[in-house]
């Protein structure tokens, strides 16, 4: 466990024990530990696919089939299981320490692990909506059709759009409102598995810091903003977070 010392973990556990309103922000790094292919970076899906073609709203309106061919890759996300990092975050919520999880991931692994207050900034692979007639389908239903063909709505339309945010679309307003509210209310803001380059990941922690929160970063690699964080651990979230919870439980038990 490189970059991780016992002192560091004790220190983070202590900060969390005292927290009244901790918020967790998660990016692709936490899902990668569940074996989910990431979009960006080396071996990411955007090395294989043209994001502009398959995942922008303009691309989708031009050719919805291109998205659904690409969607076969997303099915992996639906089948993945939470890893120890997801369970540790859910445990922190049960202990009353974490009040919300803000995530950029669309795989619903936080909910699968038991987190209740999950704010999905990029939507999720839960539903699919027909842009022509407004019919809503469960993702599973559409996925079944995908085995044989490109799915179509019963109305005949090809414009079946999943409830995820495409490039060129605004983030869901209600999710953003909640994220900003938690960032400005929290006393501890923990970033897990994000290199903090994409909006709004790039600014939510700083909003929290301006409001007086302590910043914790748990990420596999150094980021360009490490120096702004009060506590930085470079390591696997699935190893770091369970260790933090273990230490924290020691502080909590009499
Ligand atoms: Zn329709």
Image (cartoon, helix red, strand yellow):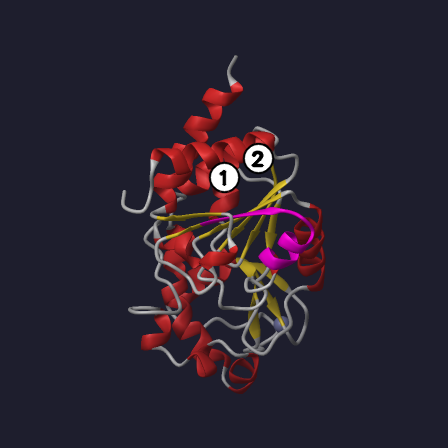
Q: Quadrant of ligand 1?
A: bottom right
The x, y position of residue 103, in whole percent, is 54, 54
| Residue 93: image tag | 2
Q: Pointer 1: what residue? A: 89
Tell me if 127 is positioned left or right of 3 in this view. Answer: right
The quadrant the N terminus occupies is top left
Residue 6 magenta = no
Name the side, left or right, on which 205 lies relative to 149.
right
User: Residue at (64%, 42%) from the top-left corner?
Assistant: 187
Residue 193 percent location from the top left of the image = 43, 54
Number of residues whose C-alpha sits closer than 10 Å to that of mark 2, classed few (under 14), some (14–19) or many (20 or more): many
Question: x, y percentage for residue 226?
Answer: 45, 57
Residue 109 at x, y = what percent? 46, 47
**Residue range (magenta):** 205-217
Dot 1: element = helix
Q: Is residue 249 above or below residue 134?
A: above
Q: CA distance from mark 1 to mark 2?
A: 6 Å
Numbered mark located on residue 143 in the image: none
Above or below residue 39? Residue 230 is above
């Amino acid at each position: 466990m490189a970059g991780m010392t016992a002192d560091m973990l004790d220190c983070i556990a202590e900060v969390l024990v005292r927290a009244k309103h901790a918020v967790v922000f998660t990016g692709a790094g936490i899902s990668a530990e569940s074996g989910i292919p990431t979009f960006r970076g080396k071996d990411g899906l955007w090395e294989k696919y043209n994001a502009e073609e398959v995942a922008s709203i303009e691309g989708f309106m031009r050719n919805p089939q291109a998205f659904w061919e690409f969607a076969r890759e997303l099915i992996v996300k639906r089948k993945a299981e939470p890893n120890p990092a997801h369970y540790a975050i859910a445990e922190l919520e049960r202990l009353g320490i974490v009040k919300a999880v803000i995530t950029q991931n669309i795989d619903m692994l936080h909910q699968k692990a038991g987190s209740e207050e999950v704010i999905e900034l990029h939507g999720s692979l839960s539903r699919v909506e027909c842009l022509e007639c407004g019919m809503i389908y469960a993702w599973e239903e559409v996925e079944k059709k995908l085995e044989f063909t490109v799915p179509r709505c019963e109305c005949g339309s090809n414009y079946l759009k999943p409830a995820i945010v495409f490039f060129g679309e605004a983030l869901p307003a209600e999710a953003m409102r909640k994220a900003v509210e938690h960032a400005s209310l929290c006393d501890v803001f923990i970033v897990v598995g994000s290199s903090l380059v994409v909006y709004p990941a790039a600014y939510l922690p700083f909003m929290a810091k301006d409001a007086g929160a302590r910043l914790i970063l748990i990420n596999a690699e150094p980021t360009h903003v490490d120096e702004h964080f009060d506590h930085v651990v470079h390591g696997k979230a699935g190893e770091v977070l369970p260790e933090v919870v273990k230490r924290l439980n020691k502080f909590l038990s009499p």
